[in-house]
Image: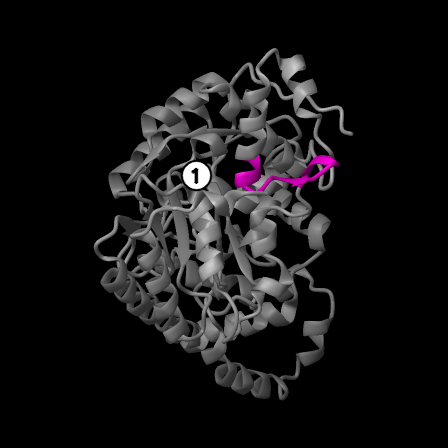
Amino acid sequence: MTKWLPALDSKAGPKYLQIAEAIGESVTSGILSARDRLPPQRELAYQLDVSLNTVSRAYAEAAKKGFLCGEVGRGTYVRTTSPLAESASAANMIRSERGLINFALNLPSAADSAAVLARTLETLTGSPSLSSFLDYQADGDLTRHLEAGATWIRRTGLRASSDALVLTNGAQHGLLVALLSLMRPGDVLLTEAATYAPVMALAAHFGLKLFPVPIDEKGLLPDALDSACRKTAATTLYCLPTLHTPTTSTMTVERREEIADVARKFGLCIIEDDVFGFLPQNRPPPVAHYAPERTIYVSSVSKSLAPGLRVGYLHAPKKMIRQLHSAVNLSCWMPPPLMAEIASIWIEDGTAEFLNDRRRVEAMFRQQTARRILGRHAFQADPCGMHLWLHLPAHWRPELFRISAEKRGVKLMTADVFSVAPSRAANAVRLCLSHEVSRERVVRGLDIVANLLDEQGDASALIV
């Protein structure tokens, strides 16, 4: 049995929710590991000076959120995998025309890229420098790849230059590199209150303290960011200003300028995640445009071209380039040159623009379909986005809705997965429309969700 006692001093709300939130935070941070047995309910109630019923409700709440499981006669244990890890497992990455309809993963299909890739590989076979793509790369070998990356990023409105660029193994690797360069264990990382879940996992592994900053329909609240800087003396902010995950919001120009001003006021470094930035037809320039001297801009080609093309770009102040290079070397030595070559060819010959247009057209079609099927229900979405943020009716709780949807054949993600403080998560779920190859399966899945929204939840679905 694990000797674990939750710290509740900084938490608000009913005691059972405070305990449930502490359980979720301990699992996310690694304090509690898979298969750890929690203290018996009566014992924990005595230690916390609360009623047995309070602890029972807390354990039940944590189980509903997917952190715990009960075994009759043996006690309560941490689940072997979190809902996020289960959705991101290799088995769930497979795109199938059978089985559960997957609205949990935000990955576009690369099916229409096969013919283009075949032509590119055929061209590469005649290249006199083919063998160099299988060798370690010197700085001079990267020049063309960096110039292509800068060309691609300039499409977002950022005045990118190749000498301020670092290649990474995709955007998620770029985030790891940025955090590795800027932060040390115990540092405070500011994030939107709802944020990209893998960043929370990275923060836990690095021993960082997450501090949530409130958001509205325009993104981060500047006054709240100002207050967070005063309270925490944090030096780094991570944010997703364009097609935010999970809420789909895009910051206005005015809001981006205000965020940049607050960052400048407190000497804050910004990690700007713009992985969806190539999808909107019209969008404001990145936050990096307004605060270039303090922003690490993170991008990749995974959402715009193909998810398996693991090529990412960091655009940063030149004073940071050396430390970012060092972090790349430490974490993977170098991104695969062949991947970078394919991305560069596609950027140079117009293929990248063609594929990005295809992604946008498909996203727009699926969003229109979602609007038609879910139109009478409350949700947020961008016409060019790959996901939507569905607000649940009062009679539905997110975890109950997730379980009920899965029983009907649809996988989705609940708001607490993206919340820095899970107990204060919105009564909402995220639906990703991009992972399924078949439009027919998307329609079928949306019909299931729409019908479920009109029903009353069956609480028996939550029994562990």
In the image, residue 27 lies in the stretch drawn in magenta? no
Where 103 falls versus 232 (above or below)?
Answer: below
Residue 452, how many percent across, how many down?
A: 35, 55
Q: Is residue 259 left or right of residue 461?
A: left
What secondary structure is found at the residue carrying circle 1?
Answer: loop
Q: Is residue 123 left or right of residue 225?
A: right
Of 68 and 416, the residue lying toward us: 68
Residue at 58% from the left image edge and 14% from the top image edge = 50
Residue farthest along the right direction in this orientation: 1
Of 403 and 303, the residue lying toward us: 403
Residue at 59% from the left image edge and 83% from the top image edge = 121
Of 289 and 373, the residue lying toward us: 373
Residue 170, how many percent across, how many down?
A: 56, 58
Where 5 falls versus 156 (above or below)?
Answer: above
Can residue 272 be seen? Answer: no
Of 151 and 229, the residue lying toward us: 229
Mark 1 residue crowding within 10 angstroms, few (<14) / some (14–19) / many (20+): many
Quadrant of residue 239 in the image? Answer: top left
* Disc 1 residue type (three-letter): Ala
Which stretch is magenta?
A: 62-78
In the image, residue 63 lies in the stretch drawn in magenta? yes
Can residue 220 be seen? Answer: yes
Residue at 51% from the left image edge and 74% from the top image edge = 98
Residue 138, how many percent across, how many down?
A: 69, 62
Residue farthest along the top direction in this orientation: 49
Quarter of the picture containing the C terminus is: top right
Q: Which residue is mark 1?
A: 194
Quadrant of residue 342 in the image? Answer: bottom right
Residue 290, how many percent across, how many down?
A: 35, 40
Quarter of the picture containing the N terminus is: top right
Residue at 54% from the left image edge and 54% from the top image edge = 171
